[in-house]
Image: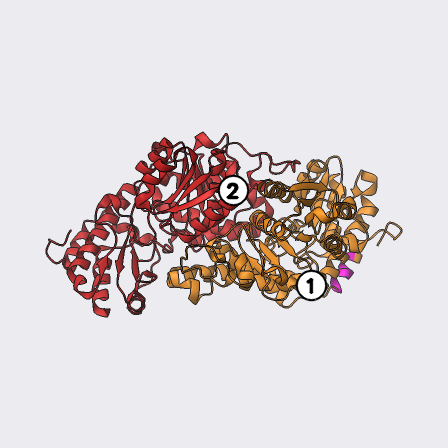
Chain colours: A red, B orange
């Protein structure tokens, strides 16, 4: 829907929901009544599968005690959950591992990536990326003696070409966390490879929201969090994807004992495990990790292509409603209108963003604000409806 | 009790338990029946306070959604839980933070410690420490261009003096994870300071088991895990203590956004927060972190000096039983007999360690084995009894 169409009605929303093949998924999430939850791009809603799984983990801890690491599969969880997430990334098994925070995984992966291109001295980092990505890139640059340049995505392709032989790593976010713009992973990955560099994608705002094709694109590394579109819970552990072709030379700085070839042998020196197990770091937080695992259950019977189609339908409809009802009230739609450039959120710009979002929260419409003037609304196709989108815009209109 | 005393009886154990001021604490832990749990030095038993707290966290996530970070105190949890653990370390508030794994915290702290002594090029590491400590020290040395020397604790004081002006950091474990030997924190800390170095203590096997006095000793840094004597659950987040006198110059490599002075301002460069908040890294795993917080409740009404006294009574009694019943069966008590050199475990050496421990598990006596020939038995004074100790030795005698 675009500005030229007629003003969308609530009946349109109801019709869209009636023909929504994912309408039945909402029942798998424990959403409070009276709330329109459009902040699942910050913290996904609670999947109904999680409390029982957490209760079972507590039972295992209480009854099985230390043997839970083996008898209940805790030890294998980082790779087991990693493979389930890998399935959402277009990654064959054995290339994804889960544990620690996104910040830690970014540091670890970026250092390992740069070491793959020893001798090259430049790292290019997405200037519009989440701050932690840029802070950690600067830290890695300082430790390895590399030049880290922050570059706007609009100029990244040119900068890759210009840096050429000195380029070690390109680190960028698949989806801009503020504007919701989806970048062209294929083109940037190819450009980085053409320059002889490796690429590290931050897919925090993409994983679970849209199909990815890491293996097909030959992506080198990717990191993402478990608590946004994967709905793994507050601070759910992050994941790291390392393309199998880099396993032989993968060389991480966080040489914790979990990544050792013989973690219980207490050998004198660090010797990495084979395969993706070498990217394990320390002991993972099992309660949080197995909550994330249970949250992934919904993806067992849902096709990510359908989730993506629903998300685009929702954001199309939200934008159409915004065009029809909000354009005269000082709002601007920041998120790209082209599907191929849109993630799973819509960002509106308004000078009174903070006050408007506070007023919306008072009406049960939850999004968030990125200073100074951006209102973000996330659309998880598994539990957000077109009626939610319609009612949210109506509420924005009312409070503005 | 020593070898010269008479053979301890089960009635002795019953009497000791009857006069145990901590006997009432066991009810706060959900131990399975038929099990003597002597592996709480690997994974503490489930505190009964934890399931309700975890259930409440799930409720907060489901109902409060993103606002849980503020309304339910999730954001403040790393420092709040840190202060509670700090109370067990002899640390005034504002010097302890919780999050990520022990391995990650060790890497972060060791790098920051070395940076405090810029220009000095040597790090001394406890050769008998847990493998992850040594692996990560080697990694930090490689990144910073430092020489890392692994030294047996018996030679550490001499090595500190010999290294002198070139010594940047001494990193060692307070308690040897294999032998259970407790080292002299005061003496080594003073020796390191005399050489102008800083000290990093790994207190994984000490925190919650015995009183510590970090502030009084002027300890610089310490790291420990949440899942041994703190009973925070499998993979519970680790803690980091940074003495307040180092906050001004603290300079960590894991510059995640949670440690930023303005974490939500998305500023262009990393600027550390004031105080211990600057040692936060990424988003902490809230389910695991708040489980740990609930596990600490037991320490609110228990004096660590009493826990230590109970632990020494238990290990004294276990050693006395071992002397009386096992010395003719090829067992050797590895753990020091002097109280000041004993942690909260007893380690026995036997050539058939693995087979014996397997047979013990079949009788519900749970300890663990460290290859090739060490049997470890941990004594958490909050839930282990003298009768447990007696019955464990009787079981060892039977299966040997």
Percent of width and height locating residue B115: 60, 51
Of discs 2 and 1, which sits in the foreground?
2
Percent of width and height locating residue A167: 42, 36
Residue A73 marker: none
Number of numbered markers:
2
Circles 2 and 1: CB atoms closer than 8 Å: no
Residue A12 visible to an observer of this rendering: yes
Task: Assess whether residue B18 is covered by the magenta stretch.
Answer: yes
| Quadrant in the picture for residue B387 | bottom right
What residue do we see at 55% from left, 43% from top? A254
Dot 1: element:
helix
Residue B304 marker: 1
Residue B176 visible to an observer of this rendering: no
Quick one: quadrant of the N terminus of chain B?
bottom right
| Quadrant in the picture for residue B10 | bottom right
- Horizontal side of residue A156 vs A248, given as left or right: left
- Horizontal side of residue A27 vs B25, given as left or right: left
Task: Assess whether residue A165 is covered by the magenta stretch.
Answer: no
- Horizontal side of residue B256 vs B332, given as left or right: left
Quick one: quadrant of the C terminus of chain B?
top right
Residue B100 vertical placement versus A84 (above, below): below
Residue pushed farthest front? A162
Q: How much space separates mark 2 and mark 1, taking CA atoms? A: 46 Å
Over which residues does the magenta segment extend? B13-19
Percent of width and height locating residue A366: 31, 62
Please name whichever residue, B120 or B199, is drawn nearer the observer in this view of the structure: B120
Q: Chain of mark 1?
A: B
Counting other residues with Cα less than 10 Å from the Cα at mark 2, is it few (<14), some (14-19), or many (20 or more)? few
Residue A145 marker: 2
């Amino acid at each position: 829907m675009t500005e030229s169409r007629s003003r969308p009605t609530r009946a349109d929303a109801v019709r869209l929901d009636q023909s929504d093949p994912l309408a039945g998924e909402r029942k798998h999430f424990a959403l409070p009544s009276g709330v329109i939850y459009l902040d699942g791009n910050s913290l996904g809603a609670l999947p109904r599968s999680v409390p029982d799984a957490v209760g079972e983990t507590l039972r295992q801890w209480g009854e099985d005690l230390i043997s839970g690491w083996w008898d209940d599969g805790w030890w294998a969880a980082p790779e087991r959950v990693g493979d389930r997430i890998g399935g959402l990334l277009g990654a064959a098994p054995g290339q994804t591992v889960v544990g620690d925070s996104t910040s830690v995984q970014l540091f670890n992966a970026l250092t390992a990536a740069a070491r793959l291109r020893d001798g090259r001295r430049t790292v290019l980092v997405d200037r519009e990326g989440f701050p932690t990505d840029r802070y950690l890139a600067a830290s890695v640059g300082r430790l390895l003696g590399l030049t880290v340049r922050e570059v706007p995505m609009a100029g990244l392709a040119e900068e890759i070409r210009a840096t050429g032989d000195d380029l070690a790593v390109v680190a960028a976010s698949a989806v801009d966390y503020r504007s919701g713009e989806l970048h062209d992973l294929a083109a940037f990955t190819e450009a980085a490879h053409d320059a002889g560099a490796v690429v590290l994608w931050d897919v925090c705002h993409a994983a679970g929201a849209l199909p990815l094709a890491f293996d097909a694109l030959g992506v080198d590394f990717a990191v993402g969090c478990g608590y946004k579109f994967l709905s793994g819970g507050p601070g759910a552990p992050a994941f790291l994807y390392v393309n199998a072709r880099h396993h032989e030379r993968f060389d991480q700085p966080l040489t914790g004992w979990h990544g050792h070839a013989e973690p219980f042998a207490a050998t004198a020196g660090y010797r990495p495990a084979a395969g993706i197990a070498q990217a394990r770091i320390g002991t993972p937080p099992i309660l949080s990790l197995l909550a994330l695992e249970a949250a992934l259950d919904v993806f067992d019977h849902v096709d990510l292509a359908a989730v993506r189609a629903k998300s685009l339908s929702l954001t199309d409809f939200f934008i159409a409603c915004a065009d029809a009802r909000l354009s005269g009230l000082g709002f601007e739609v920041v998120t790209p209108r082209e599907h191929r450039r849109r993630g799973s959120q819509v960002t509106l710009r308004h000078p009174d963003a903070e006050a408007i979002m506070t007023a919306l929260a008072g009406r049960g419409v939850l999004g968030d604000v990125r200073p100074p003037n951006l209102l973000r609304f996330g659309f998880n196709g598994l539990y957000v409806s077109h009626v939610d989108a319609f009612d949210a815009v109506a509420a924005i209109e009312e409070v503005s």
